[in-house]
Image (tube, helix red, strand yellow):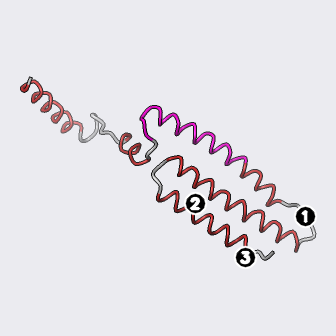
Amino acid sequence: MHLAYPAVLSALLFCTGLYGVLARRNAILVLMSVELMLNAVNLNLVAFDVWLSRTAEETLHSGQALTLFTIAIAAAEIGIGLAIVLAVHRNRGTADIDKLRDTSERHDPDGPDGDALAAEQSGEAQKAEATA
């Protein structure tokens, strides 16, 4: 088999994973896209290892060993990532990345907008007392 076939397939897998990371808003789908990108890298490592072992006299198979290391790292990454996503989903009720980003960017009362925020909150409290 030519080296071009697995290289093209790997490029397609990597581009699909990159699109998934950039376009998806669900955290689990983003993690799946990262896994797809890692699998594309693994395919490249094995394909080039086989191609280089045919030309070299020594057959160390370092590409295959590195692939096993990458698979182990990917398994740990997906386990920790899913645990984080489940914990966030339990606390906030959503796995949407945009909504999680919006809830984490709250104004600090001690920051530069703290006086304006405090004035706005006291104005709302006065309106609530007036209507009650």
The amino acid pointed to by label 2 is Gly
User: What is the quadrant of the N terminus in the image?
Assistant: bottom right
Label 1 residue SS: loop
Please provide percent x and percent y for residue 54.
Answer: 88, 72
- Rendered view: 58 above or below 111: below
Residue at image mark 3? 4
User: What is the quadrant of the C terminus in the image?
Assistant: top left
Please provide percent x and percent y for residue 119.
Answer: 15, 34
Please provide percent x and percent y for residue 92.
Answer: 42, 35
Label 2 residue SS: helix
Let me know if residue 52 is in the magenta part.
no
Residue closest to the eye, 109 or 75: 75
Q: Main secondary structure of the magenta part?
A: helix
Residue drawn at x 81%, y 58% is 64
Residue drawn at x 69%, y 47% is 73
- Rendered view: 52 above or below 82: below
Residues in magenta, as a range = 72-94
The amino acid pointed to by label 1 is Thr
Would you say 130 lies left or right of 100 here? left
Residue at image mark 1? 59
Which numbered disc flags the more N-terminal residue, 3 or 2?
Answer: 3
Indicate the quadrant where residue 40 lies: bottom right
Work out how far the residue at label 1 is from the one at label 3, CA to CA, in angstroms. Answer: 21 Å
